Amino acid sequence: MTLPVDHIHNLDSYITNEGEAFETAADSEMVTMDLWVPSEFVTMHSIDPPSAPKRKWAELIPWILEDRLLQPIEEVHFVICGQNTDGQLQILVASQSDIQNWQRVAKNSGVAAQSMYPDYMALPYEEGRISVGWRDGSFIARFGAVDGFAASPDLAWTMIESLLEEDQGLRLSLSIPDTAIVPEHIVELADINNSELDWQFSQLPSQCNLLSGEHKAVSNIALLAWLPATLLGVISVLLSVIYLQIASANISGEISQLENRLSQGYSRLFDGRRPAPKDVKIEVDSRISTLFSQRNSLKSEPIAGLIALNQLMKGCGCQLSGLRLIDGTLVMQIENGAQLKKRRLNIPGYRVGITQQEGDDENAIELRLTPNKKGADQ
C-alpha cells in the first residue's frame, strides 16, 4: 500500500482506534511515504563550486562549510540541491540526529520514509514572489526555487522585511488563518488569503531529498517491482545451465560415437592391435609411411622383375632350381621348362632370353631377364 505525500507531524492521524499505525508498526509490509519535515531544522547554504572535479565535491563541501556550522561536520548531513542563477551551489544541511529521529518517528507509525523534504518547499514557487504559509504556530516562507525558511512569527517578519528591503520588486503572498498576526505595514503590501496547505497534494520538488547518501531509503515496492525481473533472470540462468549440461552430454555422446567409428575404421584397414582414439592418427600415418616404403621396394630390382615374370610363368609346371642377380640381370635355372619354351617371351620393359642348360636334360633351361634402360629408368 502506498499513501500520498504527507507531513511528518500528521503521521499520528493514521493511528487506528486500536492504537496501531496502518496495519501495525511492526508489520514487515510497512507503508511507503514521501514526507515533509520541519524546515526550522534545515538550513540552506550557497557556496562557489569547488575547483576540484565534481566527483570530489561531496568530500570537499563539508570542510568548506565547517566554519558556518554549529556542529561537527561528522554529525551533519549535506545535500547538493543544484546551482542558482549566480552559479553558486545550494546545499541543504540537516543534523544526522534529526534525520534519524524523523525516520524513527515514521517507523513507529508504520511508515517507511521514501524521501524527506523541507516543508517550505510545499509552498508554490513563482519567480519574484515570496510565498508565506502557516504551520502549527510557525511561518514557513519560500522565495526561490529551493530557498526558504521556517521561523516563529516575530523572527519570520524580520526576515521577510529584510528580503523586501533587498529587492523592492518582490511581491508577497500570505496564506494565514488570521490577518491579526500580520504587521500593518505588511498587510498593505501583501496578497492575503486563508487557504491551508494540503500536504498530501503539494508538488514534490525534483531535488533536495534529505534521504540521500548514507540515509538513502530502499523501497519495498521498488524491490517487489524488480522481483519478477530477478526471478526471470534466475530462471533464464538455470535454463541456460541445464541447456549447456544437456548439450555437453550430447556432444560427449557424439564424440564417443566418432571415436568408436574411428577405431573400427582403423581395424577394417589395418591388422593388429586397435590403438586408442587419440593415437589413431599417429598409427595411420606410420602405417601409410610403411606402405609407401613397401611400394617403392616392389618397384626396385630384382623384385620388380620377379613380379613381371608372374604372368609368364603361371601354370608352366616349372621348378626353380637356381636364382642369381648378375649385373642387373636376373638369371634363373629352371627344371621342366618345356612349357615355358613354347610361350611367347614378351615382358614390357625387359629383355627375355632362354638358353639350354649344360647336360642331357633338354627341359633344363636358363632364363635371363634384363631390364631395358628406359624401362629401368621408369
Image (cartoon, rainbow, N blue to C red):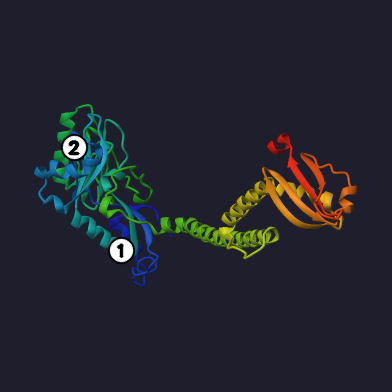
Which of 249/54 is in front?
Answer: 249
Residue 192's disc number: none
Residue 39 rendering spot, x and y as whole percentages: 22, 48
Q: Residue at x 61, y 62 (%)?
A: 256
Q: Relative to residue 351, is residue 47 drawn left or right?
A: left
Residue 179 visible, this orientation: no
Asked if residue 275 is positioned above or below residue 287 in the image, the reply reads below
- Secondary structure of the residue carrying numbered label 1: helix
Furthest-bottom residue in this view? 18
Residue 258 rendering spot, x and y as whole percentages: 64, 59
- Secondary structure of the residue carrying numbered label 2: strand
Q: Residues within 10 Å of mark 1 (few under 14, many from 20)?
A: some
| Residue bearing the label numbered 2 | 46
Q: Residue at x 36, y 73 (%)?
A: 18
Asked if residue 375 is positioned above or below residue 246 in the image, the reply reads above
Quarter of the rendering containing residue 51: top left
| Residue bearing the label numbered 1 | 107
Asked if residue 78 is positioned above or below residue 269 in the image, the reply reads above
Q: Relative to residue 202, is residue 377 drawn left or right?
A: right
